[in-house]
Image (cartoon, rainbow, N blue to C red):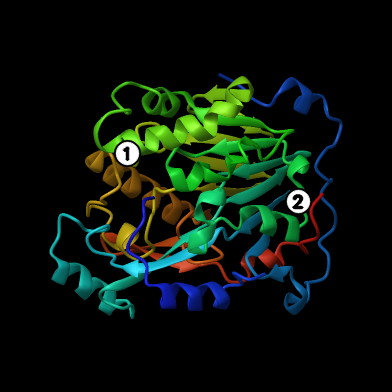
Amino acid sequence: MAGQTVGMNRRNALKLALGGAAAGTLVSAAASAQEAQAPAAAEAPPLPNLADAPLAPGWRRFQVGDAKVTVILDGVRPGDGPFPTFGEDQTAEAVAELMEANMLPSNQFVNFFHPVVVETGGQTVLIDTGFGSGGRSGGLGYLSQRLEAAGFAPDLINTVVLTHLHADHIGGLTENNAPAFPKAHHVVGRIEHEFWTSDAAKAGGTAGNAEAVAMRLGPLENNLVKAEDGDEVAPGLFLRAAYGHTPGHFALELNSGGKRMFFMGDVFGQYVVSLQRPEWQVRFDMGKQEAAETRKRFAAMLADEKLPFFGYHMPFPAVGYVLRDGDSFRYMPETYSLQLDREVSAPG
């Protein structure tokens, strides 16, 4: 998602507070040949000591069935808003009223950026890559160092999946014009890739992002898998069409050990507006009506099936639930229920 005007003092304060200093299966032949398997289900262990749960500045780990999910905070960006980025078809007063009703400032907000690692079936999958080196002067682009802190060396990543090709999701694909994850194959939606490499995308208001796509995906062209809705990118991890924010935007569904979780990319871009007013327009949604319908569809499904979800721009650690609230919805952050399923251990 594109940016807002940043106040340097607010940004630095938040950076310090959050640890800124510190079809079918698309699994590749090499990956599918690996013999590593997810551990078999065992008897339920004693409840973990939550004070000892893995928590370090900038990352948090969860258990979902037999899979492990590690959220990485690439950075935070405070700025003016959320109007007109969110609710651009509304008045500033209407958006301010909604913010105040949720105990938030009326004219300032914080955008969070979270890549996530999913360990499933012996594979280690990175979903989205943050800003990379281009964001570091602005307090962003912490993915590489925080992956290391969470126990993931770059060559441990088997697969990189891109929900879509906006710059804040693809910036960490390369370092010094070389692949940042040299042993990974890279998965992108076919529709998404075709749009951003088209002549239409290279003109007008999308030209800057199309240039970023060429820069970041160019070095990966020989290791790029173009995927379709429903494809399985790793054991139990499936692509789900979530179009609207961009022409080929994907969410992902994880099915592991009888548990499910969704990774929503930019379907929900702001935890109040996106759920309480899913019909309001978002400036960076390319297909505004389609994006609104996608928000409503997924919000209803997540609420009715009581499933946890991860949202790229949700407040750290970006995992929560959707509750029905009359004709609308409300966000409920995850607190400890995923920690109680079984103790969360180190990667691998």
**Which residue is found at the position 74% from the left and 56% from the top?**
148
Check disc 1: other Cα within 10 Å, few if <14, some if 14-19, many if 20+: many
Dot label at residue 113? none
**Apparent side of residue 17 relative to residue 38 in the rendered image (left or right):** left
Dot label at residue 244? 1
Residue 128: x and y in percent read 55, 44
- How many numbered markers are drawn? 2
Q: Is residue 69 above or below residue 14?
A: above
- State the image quarter where residue 159 is shown: top right
Q: Is residue 128 above or below residue 104?
A: above
Tell which tag, 1 or 2, sits nearer the viewer: 2
Asked if residue 87 can be seen in this view, the reply is yes
**In-front residue for pair 180/333:** 180
As helix, strand or loop, the secondary structure at mark 1 comes to loop
Identified by mark 1, the residue type is: Gly
**Which residue is found at the position 22% from the left and 41% from the top?**
289
Check disc 2: other Cα within 10 Å, few if <14, some if 14-19, many if 20+: some
Q: Is residue 22 above or below residue 30?
A: below
As helix, strand or loop, the secondary structure at mark 2 comes to loop
**In-front residue for pair 64/248:** 248
- State the image quarter where residue 55 is shown: bottom right
Decide which of tag 1 and tag 2 comes sooner along the chain: 2
Residue 243: x and y in percent read 36, 36
**Apparent side of residue 139 relative to residue 195 in the rendered image (left or right):** right
Identified by mark 2, the residue type is: Phe
Q: Which residue is mark 2?
A: 152
**Which residue is found at the position 46% from the left and 68% from the top?**
332
Residue 165: x and y in percent read 45, 37
